[in-house]
Image: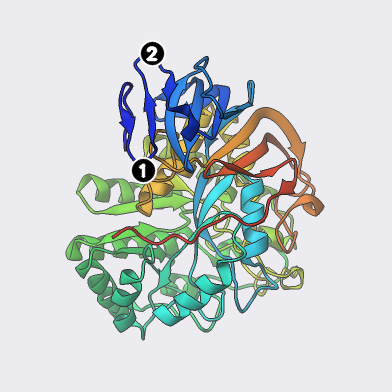
Amino acid sequence: MKFRDGMWIEGSGVRVSDDGSVADGGSVEVVLRSTRVITPGGTRAASVAVAGGRIAAVLPYDAAVPAGARLEDFGGDVLMPGLVDTHVHVNDPGRTEWEGFWTATRAAAAGGITTLVDMPLNSLPPTTTVDHLRTKQAVAAAKAHIDVGFWGGALPDNLKDLRPLHDAGVFGFKAFLSPSGVDEFPELDREQLARSMGEIASFGGLLIVHAEDPHHLAAAPQQGGPRYADFLASRPRGAEDTAIAHLIAEARRLDARVHVLHLSSSDALPLIAEARRAGVRLTVETCPHYLTLTAEEVPDGASEFKCCPPIREAANQDLLWQALADGTIDCVVTDHSPSTADLKTDDFATAWGGISGLQLSLPAVWTAARARGHGLEDVVRWMAARTAELVGLDDRKGAIEAGRDADFAVLAPDETFTVDPAALQHRNRVTAYAGRTLYGVVKSTWLRGRRIVAEGEFTEPKGRLLTRTP
């Protein structure tokens, strides 16, 4: 809901007069003030009034604080919307020793993330039936420090479950076109993909896809061992490019809405841009590790850098940044995919593929973005506004404006820190960012107007379980 001066904010009991003061101030609980508030209209000095867990108004910086309201003044630290991470593997229940809702959501909160959407695999059971969704929701309910939603899964044998899962509130359906790495979540072949995409399109759902072509992967050299160059050769760009081309063709044929997960190949960008110009309903994400790490710097045997698709060369990274800038890539998400440390062996062929990045995604992206001339407004667009839009939460999340949830991160953008794995909240503190100096210290994180973490101190879990809005 948009705000205009001199009007009541529906549902909040708050009136803002033409001069910017708040009337009936007893209903405003807290006012958050900063000289740098990132709003959809730009960054400015402002005071943000919060009532009933929502933003009641964005006011002039020196607006009077209503009687009974508490003022939180952040000085020159940036007040930005809490990030929305739509690609997280929590693994709970079933593989909770890899990660769990308690630790994952604490790590997210420490990194300025206030909403995450959990992937359907690596937990046991996977989120592929309504019963399995209810199991996962029951586990998450008491452990979530931030708001949590859920993706469903599209498997070869669960076509009948897709519409019931949609009706139960999942935000869309994930599918693999090549092996997922876990037996209970098999990939779709081309015929199965067409059936699933058609079914999901029939009820207006969203299909999100790990796009690597299995035939290209099978034909690539499979050396094994500790050399990163050998692993990179085993996951060629052509595997992504071919899979994305097929997705585009099927999305065009079926008029389906499709989202490409964790794009790493810059060679696919012209295909994506052309498809979007032609009206194909296609969106695309990339990840912090593709934007901040390069193949040239990965040490041999350092499988904390292993992910699929892989981290590619610096020249490839430059083109991903260009695509973010011009809008070909829509958003940036973590693809937080942790495991226990023992699964990160020095053999790239057999080590678990996944990078843990929840707590560090904002400073990692901001460090690289500022070096390339981007501002925090860009980061907010990529990691909050567009991710909220992807899952249909843009009426509630992803921006500082009246009517949205009062979810915030307070960031000191010019302060630096050196990544110490022992300081991370992830259950397993294996990180590709160890020892790196990053810009951007998250001073506090707020969920619906309540501070949930500050200076490493957490409140009790306050997160809610989210479902897709019908």
- The residue depicted at 40 percent of the width and 46 percent of the height is 396
Mark 1 lies on a secondary structure that is loop
User: Does 289 sit above or below residue 134?
Assistant: above
State the count of labels: 2
Q: Nearer the viewer, residue 65 or 209?
A: 65
Residue 166 rendering spot, x and y as whole percentages: 32, 70
Residue 116 rendering spot, x and y as whole percentages: 51, 56
Q: Nearer the viewer, residue 47 or 371?
A: 47
- The residue depicted at 60 percent of the width and 76 percent of the height is 93
User: Does 399 sit above or below residue 195?
Assistant: above
- The residue depicted at 31 percent of the width and 60 percent of the height is 258
| Extreme residue in the bottom direction | 157
Q: What is the distance, in whole Å, between disc 2 and disc 1 at their CAs?
A: 41 Å
Residue 469 rendering spot, x and y as whole percentages: 32, 58
Per the image, the residue denoted by label 2 is 19
Mark 2 lies on a secondary structure that is loop
Looking at the picture, which amino acid does disc 1 mark? Thr
Closer to the eye: label 2 or 1: 2
Per the image, the residue denoted by label 1 is 328
Residue 335 rendering spot, x and y as whole percentages: 54, 58
Labelled disc at residue 449: none
Q: Which of marks 2 and 1 is nearer the N terminus?
A: 2
Looking at the picture, which amino acid does disc 2 mark? Asp
| Any part of residue 357 in sight | no
Quarter that holds the C terminus? bottom left
User: Does 352 sit above or below residue 228?
Assistant: below
- The residue depicted at 35 percent of the width and 83 percent of the height is 158
| Crowd class of label 1 (few under 14; some 14 to 19; many from 20; radius 10 Å) | many
The image quarter containing residue 29 is top right
User: Does 468 sit above or below residue 52?
Assistant: below
Name the side, left or right, on which 72 lies relative to 309: right
